[in-house]
Image (cartoon, helix red, strand yellow):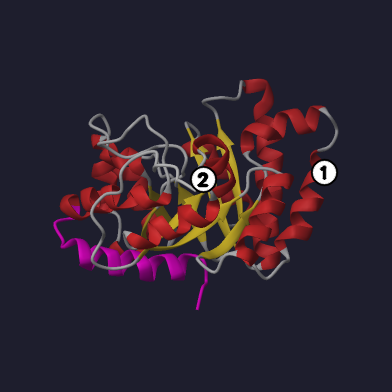
Amino acid sequence: MTEIPLPVPAPQALPTGVIDSHCHLDIIQSTSGLDIGRALTTAADVGVVGVVDVGVDVDSSRRSVEIAKEHPAVVGAVVGIHPNAAPTLLEMHTLGAELEAIAALGADPSVIGIGETGLDYFRTEAAGRQAQHESFRAHIQLAKDLNKTLVIHDRDAHDDVLAILNEVGAPQRVIFHCFSGGPEMARFVSDSGWYLSFAGVVTFKNAESLREALDVADRERILVETDAPYLTPTPNRGKPNASYLMPDTVRVMAQRRGVEVGELGEQLFRNTHAAFGLS
C-alpha cells in the first residue's frame, strides 16, 4: 500500500527533543488525512518527541483521553470547552451539564490540563461574553480542585482574562496557549510565574510585537506549540500544520533569543514538564 505523502515536507530535525505543548491530533487527521500514529512518528523523526493533545468540547476531550492512553508519545490530554462554544451551550441550557462532563473527564490520570478555556472576543459578540466568563470561571475552579494545569485561550481579551484570573484565583500552574500579547503582558505573565506558549505566529512577518514578547519572557516560562492543524509556521504558512513542523518555530525562537537551537530545545523540554507537573 502506497503511503500518502506528507501535507508539507518535513524540516531539518532538531538536535534535542522538544514537546509540542498544544495540538489537536483528531482535527489534524480529519483535515489533512495524516493519521495519528504517523503524525507522532513523523514528529519524533524531527525531534518532537512528545505532544499534548487538547480537546475543545466534551466529545473531543473524551477522544483526547483515549488518544493519550493509546499512544505513549502523547504525554497527556487537556480537556475543556472552547470559549467560543460557551454562548451556544448556555443558550441551549446545556453548559452546566457539559462542564460536569469535563469535570468527570478531568479526574482521569491521563489528563494533565483543563482547557482550552478562556475568552475570545474576536469571534464572540458582546452578548455572548457573559457565557464565556461563566465557563472560564468554572474551568479555573476545576483546575484548582483537580490540581491540573489551566490552559488559557486568550484572543483580544487580555484585560478580562487577567481580571477573572485575579478574581477566582489562579491555579498553581497556568499556560497562556498561543500567547498573543505584547511585551508588557509577557512581563506580567512571566513575573506571575505563569507560562507563555509560542506557536507558529511568532514566525510571521507581521508579528514583531509577539517577538518582542518572546524577548522579555523569562527563559524558564516559555513553551512552544503548534496548535496544529492551525497556525503553520513560515515558510509553510497557510498549509496544514502538524507537530513535525514545529522545528521551524523553534529555530526562529532560538535565533530571536540569541541562543543555540539545542540549548533552547533543552530549556523548552524542561519547561513543558514543569508547566504540566510532569515527572
Mark 1 Cα-neighbour bin, 10 Å: few <14, some 14–19, many ≥20: some
Question: Which residue appears at 72% of the width and 53% of the height?
Answer: 62
Name the kind of residue labelled 1 in the image: Gly
Residue 100, given in percent of the width and then of the height, sits at 81, 52
- State the separation of the CA atoms marked 1 and 2: 23 Å
Q: Give the answer, above or below, for where 247 lies relative to 274.
A: above
Q: What residue would you read off at disc 1?
A: 96
Q: Is residue 259 magenta?
A: yes
In the picture, residue 133 is in which quadrant?
A: top right
Taking 248 as reference, is 112 left or right? right
Residue 118, given in percent of the width and then of the height, sits at 58, 42
Give the mark toward the camera: 1 or 2: 1
Residue 192 visible from this viewpoint: no
- Extreme bottom residue here? 279
Q: Is residue 256 magenta?
A: no
Q: Give the answer, above or below, for where 144 lies relative to 234.
A: below
Name the kind of residue labelled 2 in the image: Leu
Taking 206 as reference, is 97 left or right? right
Residue 41, given in percent of the width and then of the height, sits at 43, 60
Question: Which residue appears at 50% of the width and 39% of the height?
Answer: 154
In the picture, residue 184 is in which quadrant?
A: top left
Marker disc for residue 72:
none
Q: Give the answer, above or below, for where 236 lies relative to 66.
A: above
Residue nearest the viewer, comparing 147 with 20: 20
Name the secondary structure under disc 2.
helix
Question: Which residue appears at 27% of the width and 53% of the height?
Answer: 250
Question: Which residue appears at 16% of the width and 52% of the height?
Answer: 255
- Extreme front residue here? 1
- Image: magenta residue range: 257-279
Residue nearest the viewer, comparing 18 with 124: 18
Q: What residue would you read off at disc 2?
A: 162
Magenta region's main secondary structure?
Answer: helix
